[in-house]
Image (cartoon, rainbow, N blue to C red):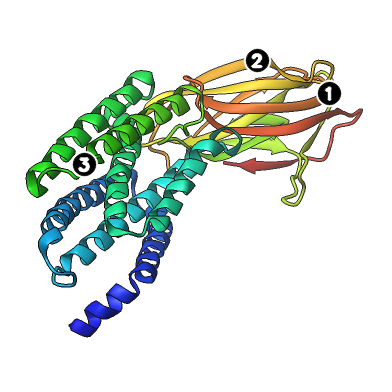
Amino acid sequence: MERLRAFVARNKRHISTLVFAGGFVADVFTLPLLDVSEVEVLFAVYLAAAGLLMLGSYAFLYRATSVPTGTMPMTGFLPLSVQFLLGALLSGLLIFYTESASLSASWPFLAILAAVFLGNEVLRKYRERFTFQVILFFFTLYAYLIFVLPVLAGSMGPVVFIGSGVSALLIFLFFVRLLRRVGGPFPQGLPRLIGLWTISIFFLVNVSYFAGILPPIPLALKDSGVYHQISRSGDGYALTGEPVSRFTWRTVVHHMPGMPLYAYSAVFAPVSLSTAIVHRWERFDEAARVWVLESRVSFPISGGRENGYRGYSLKDDPREGAWKVVIETGNGQRIAEMRFDVENVATSPATVTEYR
């Protein structure tokens, strides 16, 4: 046992990294196979377990100040367990946030998540890591409630989002009070540090949401494309468009003047969630060097279909030039965008028809 303790003490950093990476790999392979409701429960269990272990961690840390080093093995085991649970939670949430994100719009928020991962490794000292883990617990709790509350409410929007933030603050306040009750008074300066970081995270997440940077979780784009013709076919759609090479960086749509173009999207939503999806057709004005809104089409979706709720919009006789179709929620949160160039041709281009 003493050898094992010595080995863990010498290699705590490497073991921590391996456990964290293991949790990430496990989530990458298991989360896509789970139903959203199962993921909600799994995340709730992880959060509860992380909270309980942090309570024990602080209790041992506070009492270990007067105990010789090495006689309190729990002070090494508990932080490592909390790191594993929070790492697994963050990696799982990152998967969902990435699936819901338009990289061009949401990269700042995803960069924040990446910075959190780095911080989990950089802050190696136990007391520093405990402070970081308390703040990280609030961030993870907030990110989880943003994900789960729309599912429970069956809708999305500013009211539900604000409710997520208020719920996160109340739960975290209760947790901090419980920490003090279990482990005793906080070290000098710690309450102020936790308070400043909590307010900063709350402010940053709210700014990200209302600026359109926060991904519209729990929605996720499953399929999209630009087509020459879309029609109903049984319980699906017949999509007629030009063959698209996976190796081209520039999508060109050959268009016959007078004919429309269609934008198709399939957006996944949980079973209980109903919301609106918007297709925003924009054309790039070469003279003014700005994107100009040409049309905006909104349609409702209902969750539950594994491959996404399908819908489409059309643009009558688009002119030549650079175009994009922005797929977003009714509140303006960007899910994805499709960029393409329209080139007029005299004869109909070669097309293929797919059924989805």
Q: Is residue 309 left or right of residue 155?
A: right
- Coordinates of residue 345 in the picture (x, y in percent): 89, 29
Q: Mark 1: few, some, or many residues within 10 Å (few <14, many ≥20)?
A: some
Looking at the rendered image, the quarter that the N terminus falls into is bottom left
Q: Amino acid at mark 2?
A: Ser
**Which is closer to the viewer, label 1 or label 3?**
3
Q: Amino acid at mark 3?
A: Gln
Closer-to-camera residue (93/142)? 142
In this view of the protein, can residue 292 be seen by the observer? Answer: yes
**Which is closer to the viewer, label 3 or label 2?**
3
Q: Could you tell me how far apart the alpha carbons at marks 3 and 2 are, in whole angstroms?
A: 58 Å
Closer-to-camera residue (193/80)? 193
- Coordinates of residue 152 in the picture (x, y in percent): 27, 31
Q: Residue 9 falls in which quadrant of the image?
A: bottom left
On the image, numbered disc 1 is attached to which residue?
320
Q: Amino acid at mark 1?
A: Glu
Q: What residue is drawn where x is 23% and y is 52%?
A: 50
* Labelled disc at residue 159: none
Q: Could you tell me how far apart the alpha carbons at marks 2 and 1 are, in whole angstroms?
A: 16 Å
Looking at the rendered image, the quarter that the C terminus falls into is top right
Q: Are marks 3 and 2 in contact (CB under 8 Å)?
A: no
| Secondary-structure class at tag 2 | strand
Q: What residue is drawn where x is 47% and y is 32%?
A: 214
Q: How many marks?
A: 3
Closer-to-camera residue (222/65)? 65
Q: Mark 2: few, some, or many residues within 10 Å (few <14, many ≥20)?
A: some
On the image, numbered disc 3 is attached to which residue?
188
* Labelled disc at residue 295: 2
- Residue 26 vertical placement versus 187 (above, below): below
- Coordinates of residue 284 in the picture (x, y in percent): 76, 22
In this view of the protein, can residue 39 be seen by the observer? Answer: no
Q: Are marks 2 and 1 in contact (CB under 8 Å)?
A: no
